[in-house]
Amino acid sequence: MTPEQRKRIIARHRDALLRHGHSAKALYWSNTAIQEIRFQVLMEIGIQNGDRLLDVGCGFGDLFAYLKRQQIVTDYCGIDLSPDLITAGKNLYPQARFFCGDLFDLAPQPHTYDYVLLSGALNENMKDSGTYARRVIERMYQICHKGVALNLLDANNPWLANRNDLQSFMPDEMLAYCQSLGANCELRQDYLDNDFTVYLRKPQNQGLDLTA
C-alpha cells in the first residue's frame, strides 16, 4: 500500500465518521443488519470461546461486540488503518485490544492467532488488479493457527461492474488462489447477492510447530 493510498483511506473514514458517528454507515456498510450478516458468516468458520482472534480492518471493533452478544468470548485484537476509528473502538470496547496500521505494520509471527477474520477491508479499489488483496490474504493465512475467514465483493454482480471505486473479485478465481496457499477452502455464496466469503482452514500438520 502506498502512502497516498493510506492517506486516502484514512481521510475517507475520518469524513464518514464525522458525518455518521458510530454507525455502520461510517464504515460504508448500508446498515447494521447487512454488516452483521457478514459477521455471522465469518463466525461460522468455527469461532469458539477462548479463540485468539485478529480482526483485520476492524473499524470500531463491532465484531467484538457481536461475538459477545452471541455469548462467544474471544481474545480479540482489532487492527485498522484509521486512527479515528481505532480511538473510537478503544472508547467503545475497552476490554478489546486494538492496533493502528495495516497487517504488514503489525507483523505478527506465524500461528499468533487461532483465526484471522476480515470483513469489507479489501473493498477499496487499489487499482492493482487485486495484488494487494492477495498479499493480505497470504499474510493472514501465514499468521493463523486454525483458519482465515474473509468476505469480498462479487464481480459477477451487475451493480458492482459499474463501481470503479470498489474492488470486486471472481469467486472461483479467489477460491483457487486461496487453495494455492495450501489451505482447505470453502466458498460461501448463500447470504448476500453481491458478496462471497472464503474459509481457509489450516491442515492439521500446518497448524503445529514441528520444530519445537
Image: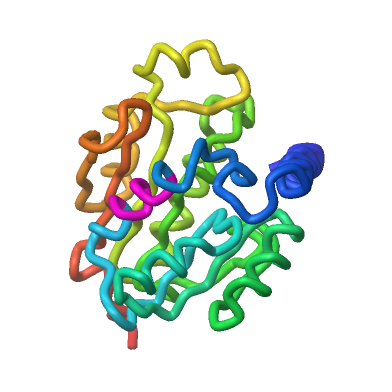
Left or right: where 85 falls relative to 193: right
Asked if the magenta segment contains residue 36, the reply would be yes
Q: Quadrant of residue 44?
A: bottom left
- Quarter of the N terminus within the rendering: top right
Q: Position of residue 18 (x, y in %)?
A: 78, 47
- Quarter of the C terminus within the rendering: bottom left
Q: Report whether residue 39 is seen.
A: yes
Using the image, determine if residue 71 lies above or below residue 31. Answer: below
Which residue: 28% across, 68% down? 47
Q: Quadrant of residue 49?
A: bottom left
Q: Position of residue 58 (x, y in %)?
A: 55, 58
Q: Main secondary structure of the magenta part?
A: helix
Farthest residue toward the bottom? 212
Q: Which residue is more in the foreground, 209 or 171?
A: 171
Q: How many marks?
A: 0
Q: Position of residue 102 (x, y in %)?
A: 64, 56
Which residue: 36% across, 70% down? 69
Left or right: where 22 falls relative to 31: right
The residue range painted magenta reads 35-41
Asked if the magenta segment contains residue 168, the reply would be no
Which residue: 47% across, 18% down? 160
Q: Which residue is more in the foreground, 122 or 103?
A: 122
Left or right: where 38 falls relative to 6: left
Q: Position of residue 5 (x, y in %)?
A: 74, 38
Q: Which residue is more in the foreground, 74 or 204?
A: 74
Which residue: 58% across, 39% down? 28
Q: Report whether residue 2 is seen.
A: no
Using the image, determine if residue 133 lies above or below residue 150. Answer: above
